[in-house]
Image: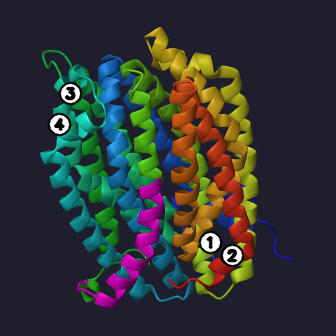
Amino acid sequence: MKKRTPFWQLLSESIRGNEQDYTRIPIKSGIVLLAVPMILEMIMESLFAVVDIFFVGRLGEHAVATVGLTEAVLTIIYSLGVGISMAGTAMVARRFGEKKFQRAGTVAFQLLLVGILASLLLGAGGFIYAGEILSLMGAEDQVLETGKTYTEIIFLGNTAIMLLFLINGIFRGAGAAHLAMRALWISNGLNIVLDPLLIFGLGSFEGFGLVGAAWATTLGRSVGVVYQLYHLFNGRHRLVINRTNLRVRWETLKKIIHISAGGMGQFLVDSAAWIVLTRIASEFGSAAVAGYTIAFRVLLFSLMPAWGLSAAAATLVGQNLGAGKAFRAEISTFLTARYNFIFLAAVTLVYLLFADNLAGFFALEEEVRNVAASGLKITVLGYIFYAVGMVMVQAFNGAGDTKTPAYINIGVFWLLEIPLAYALAITYGLETKGIFISIAICHSLHAMIALWFFRKGNWKFAKA
């Protein structure tokens, strides 16, 4: 019997980034090797979100509201980037499972073309209509006065944001999770350093206030993308873009668009729901939006690592389906879901006990603090169900079946979550608490529906 590899050794290998064949090594080892760098990647992403809102929070509730309203709209761009990256993960993972590494490079180049074109079009529109976008989201006059330039810069830099998501999806599909981790650590590490410097200044340099936060994000993301491109083109990995890949492949582009459509759809539906929920929160003033924004920035600190763990399922499913091992792909998903359930159950307990302390750390105003604390306490009540659901969704996406989660999102988030949030918040006068209750209920239901569809097994026959 083959001796089991010690956990500490797997941990070391996962961070070093030794390339593995995830269709052959033990499933539990594969989960650790993929999940550890993905979790560390997402921890840095969530750490940046928390640090950023900490510094912006020192500028007052209007600055926080600007960030919250801008990000609600930016989720559309994030959705496109993540949607295209789903196609990248699924198609590159399938090619790696088939051991067709040259074709994986071709897929990667086509993905870059799609991502760059989409980001340029959206960025131009967002820059031109920044003020109108904030107004449409219900921004108060003072938010419009202080936040328009911030929104313009963020939209101008959206190509870096989209490519960062997209290329990391490609790396994950190839099993090179360590490269995705390092790209995000470089990007967000630089963001964290630049944030206080560009917001508040240093010495005789006075800083740029809220605009400085936008520049810190744009510069940090751009450096991360430069790192990604270097590793895509340097020829040192099994995944490489070389001269033979630098051609437009229309059939590959069609497949990318087909798979991306479902991925974009599911996140656009989710994003649209997020925008509407933020718009409902804005009915109760800037303090409500600020508390709402802080609550979800803090929640991201725990959800991002959970998404990192879940993402291991996407790579394992994609590569094992490519190798013709559907049962192994299914077992990988259920094992990953078990680990994620344990993690988010522990997180739920922490938030229930310490929500007031966490909210007080980020919010100076009492009203903002109360909204944020109630958001933390209520939303985490759905975490243990969501732990399973997010793994199921990642498994669908890794298989290339991006449409099933999109249909589930439409049914749960549009047909139930939005009307329920409106009714609870406005009709029944629960205000932001009504929004949080709706989120907890609907994300729990979403998870159960996703599990039911996964067990049906149609994802095993998806083409990627």
Q: Which label sits in the foreground, 3 or 2?
A: 3
**Range drawn in magenta:** 246-269
Say left or right for 2 vs 210: right
User: What amino acid type is highlighted by mark number 2?
Assistant: Ala
The residue that disc 4 covers is 131
Residue 144: numbered disc: 3
Q: CA distance from mark 3 to mark 2?
A: 49 Å
Left or right: where 259 falls relative to 198: right
> Disc 1, disc 2: CB below 8 Å?
yes
Image height of 60 relative to 327, above or below: above
Q: Relative to residue 202, is residue 54 drawn left or right?
A: right
Whether pointer 3 and pointer 4 mark residues with C-beta atoms closer than 8 Å, the reply is yes
Mark sitting earlier along the chain (4/2): 4
Rendered image quadrant of residue 355: top right
Residue 72 seen in render: yes
**Looking at numbered disc 3 in the image, what kind of residue is underneath it?**
Leu
Q: Find residue 316 and name its label.
A: 1
- Whether residue 419 is in magenta: the answer is no
Residue under the image location 64 percent in, 59 percent down: 391
Q: Looking at the rendering, which quadrant does residue 213 occupy? A: top left
Q: Amino acid at mark 4?
A: Gly
Q: CA distance from mark 4 to mark 1?
A: 44 Å
* Above or below: residue 319 compared with residue 149: below
Where's residue 424, x and y in %? Answer: 58, 31
Residue positioned 65% across, 35% down in the render: 380
Task: Name the spot of residue 256 as percent of width and height, x first.
Answer: 38, 78
- 10 Å crowding of disc 4: few (<14), some (14-19), many (20+): some
Foreground tag (4 vs 1)? 4
